[in-house]
Image: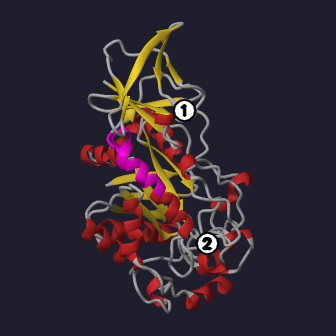
C-alpha cells in the first residue's frame, strides 16, 4: 500500500522526508510507480445536486438541509463490475474512490458514523462491491480517497456547540483510515486530501482553531511551484472541468490530450490519476467511458512506453518527451511539426529506432548537431507516435 497526500505543507526537513519515506514498502512503491495510470472517482451526495463536490461550501448549504440528501441517494444503475471493466479497458491499473469527501458523508458502511451510504434508500456498500469486483478481475487494484476536512462532523466544525475536542475528530479520522486499510483486503493506496495546520494560528488561518469558521479559502494544496521532492509523484486531472458530477459541464477533454498528459507524466517519473464523476444514478458518463477506451486502445499498442518506465533521459523538446525501460528508451512524438524528429544528447549506444506499435524500422540521421529520426506522415499516430530506441 502507498500513502499519497494532497496537502498544503511547509518544506520538508531531511528528517521529515525520511519519516514519509517509511510509509510505503519498497515493493509497494515499485508497484505504484510501475502502474503509472489510475482512475480517480468523485461520487457522493453532491452527485444528486449535480453541481460538483464543493456545492455544500460554495452555496453555503447548512448541515440540516444537506442531510436531507441522504433520503434521496439511490443509484440503481451502479454496477461495480462495469466500473472496474471501464478502468481496465482504459489501461488503468488502480482506482481511487472518495470514501468520504469534505461534506462528511461516508460512502461505505463505516462503524464510526451513521451518516453513511448504507443508511440511504440504496442500502448497499459500493466500496465493498468495488473491492470484490477488483478481486474478481485481478488486474485493477482499489484505493481510497480520505478527506482530512469534514464539514459535517461536530468535532471538526462545531466543537464549541458540541463540547467535543479536536482529539475526538482525530480519533474518528484515524479510525476510518484504519477501517479502509483493514476491511477491504489488499488496497492500492490511501489518498489524503485537505489543508492541515502545521504552523502557528493567526487571523489568516483561524478556521483551524476550535470553533473555526466553515468559510475558508486557503485550498492552495497541490500547487507547489518551488521544489519537487524525490518522492513518487502523481498528476491528477479530471476528464472535464469538475471532479464531482456537474450536469452543465460539457468540456470533455480529447483522447489525444489525455494521452499527451499520460506521456508527459511518465516522462518525469509521475503517475497519471484521471478523474470521472459518476452520475447520481451510478453511471460513468458515456462520453468519459468512450475517451477512456480510446486511451486504452492506444496503450494496448504502446503500453511498454508507459508501464514500468521511469523518467526519460533525453531532453524534452516542443514536440517530444521520453521515458525509459530496462533496455530501451522511448520517444513520444506529441506534435507533428515535421517528418524529422530532432533529438539532442542522443545516446551513442543506440543503433536502432522503430515504431513501438508494430516494429516498423525508422531511419536515423544526423544534422547540425542533432539526431534526426524520420517518421513520415503515413506512419504517424494521431494520439502519440512512440519510437523505441535500442
Q: Position of residue 19 (x, y in %)?
A: 37, 43
Classify mark 1: residues with Cα within 10 Å, few (<14), some (14-19) or many (20+).
few
Q: Residue furthest front?
A: 378
Would residue 196 be visible to someone looking at this image? Answer: no
Residue ID for mark 1: 227
- Residue 337 image point, x, y percent: 60, 28
Q: Using residue 153 as the reference point, say whether residue 94 is left or right of it.
A: left
Q: Nearer the viewer, residue 221 or 90?
A: 90
> Which mark is in front, 2 or 1?
1
In front here: 372 or 145?
372
Q: Which mark is residue 151?
A: 2
Structural distance between the alpha carbons of marks 2 and 1? 31 Å
Residue at 48% in and 72% down: 168
* Membership of 364 in magenta stretch: no
Q: Are marks 2 and 1 in contact (CB under 8 Å)?
A: no
Callout 1 secondary element? loop
- Residue 213 left/right relative to 15: right
Question: Residue at coordinates 59% horizontally, 80% vertically from top-left?
Answer: 162
Amino acid at each position: 500500500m502507498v500513502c499519497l497526500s494532497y496537502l498544503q505543507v511547509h518544506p520538508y526537513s531531511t528528517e521529515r522526508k525520511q519519516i514519509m519515506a517509511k510509509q510505503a514498502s519498497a515493493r509497494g512503491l515499485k508497484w505504484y510507480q510501475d502502474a503509472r495510470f489510475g482512475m480517480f472517482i468523485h461520487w457522493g451526495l453532491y452527485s444528486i445536486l449535480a453541481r460538483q463536490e464543493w456545492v455544500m461550501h460554495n452555496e453555503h448549504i447548512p448541515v440540516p438541509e444537506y442531510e436531507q440528501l441522504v433520503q434521496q441517494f439511490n443509484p440503481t444503475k451502479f454496477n461495480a463490475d462495469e466500473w472496474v471493466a471501464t478502468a481496465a479497458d482504459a489501461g488503468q491499473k488502480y482506482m481511487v474512490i472518495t470514501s468520504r469527501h469534505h461534506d462528511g458523508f461516508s460512502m461505505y458502511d463505516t462503524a464510526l458514523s451513521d451518516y453513511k451510504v448504507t443508511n440511504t434508500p440504496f442500502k448497499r456498500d459500493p466500496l465493498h462491491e468495488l473491492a470484490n469486483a477488483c478481486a474478481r478481475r485481478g488486474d485493477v487494484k482499489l484505493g481510497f480517497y480520505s478527506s482530512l476536512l469534514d464539514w459535517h462532523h461536530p468535532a471538526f466544525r462545531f466543537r464549541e456547540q458540541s463540547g467535543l475536542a479536536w482529539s475526538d475528530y482525530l480519533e474518528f479520522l484515524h479510525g476510518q483510515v484504519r477501517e479502509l486499510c483493514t476491511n477491504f483486503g489488499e488496497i492500492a493506496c490511501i489518498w489524503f486530501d485537505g489543508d492541515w495546520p502545521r504552523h502557528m494560528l493567526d487571523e489568516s488561518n483561524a478556521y483551524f482553531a476550535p470553533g473555526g469558521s466553515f468559510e475558508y479559502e486557503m485550498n492552495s494544496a497541490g500547487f507547489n511551484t518551488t521544489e519537487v521532492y524525490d518522492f513518487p509523484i502523481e498528476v491528477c486531472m479530471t476528464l472535464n472541468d469538475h471532479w464531482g458530477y456537474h450536469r452543465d459541464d460539457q468540456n470533455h477533454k480529447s483522447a489525444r490530450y489525455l494521452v499527451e498528459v499520460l506521456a508527459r507524466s511518465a516522462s518525469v517519473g509521475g503517475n497519471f490519476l484521471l478523474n470521472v464523476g459518476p452520475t447520481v444514478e451510478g453511471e460513468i458518463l458515456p462520453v468519459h467511458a468512450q475517451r477512456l477506451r480510446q486511451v486504452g486502445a492506444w496503450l494496448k499498442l504502446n503500453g511498454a512506453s508507459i508501464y514500468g518506465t521511469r523518467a526519460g533521459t533525453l531532453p524534452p523538446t516542443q514536440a517530444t518527451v521520453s521515458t525509459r525501460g530496462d533496455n530501451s528508451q522511448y520517444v513520444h512524438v506529441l506534435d507533428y511539426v515535421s517528418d524529422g524528429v530532432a533529438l539532442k544528447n542522443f545516446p551513442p549506444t543506440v543503433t536502432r529506432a522503430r515504431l513501438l506499435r508494430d516494429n516498423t524500422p525508422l531511419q536515423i540521421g544526423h544534422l547540425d548537431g542533432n539526431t534526426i529520426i524520420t517518421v513520415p506522415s503515413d506512419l504517424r499516430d494521431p494520439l502519440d507516435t512512440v519510437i523505441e530506441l535500442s
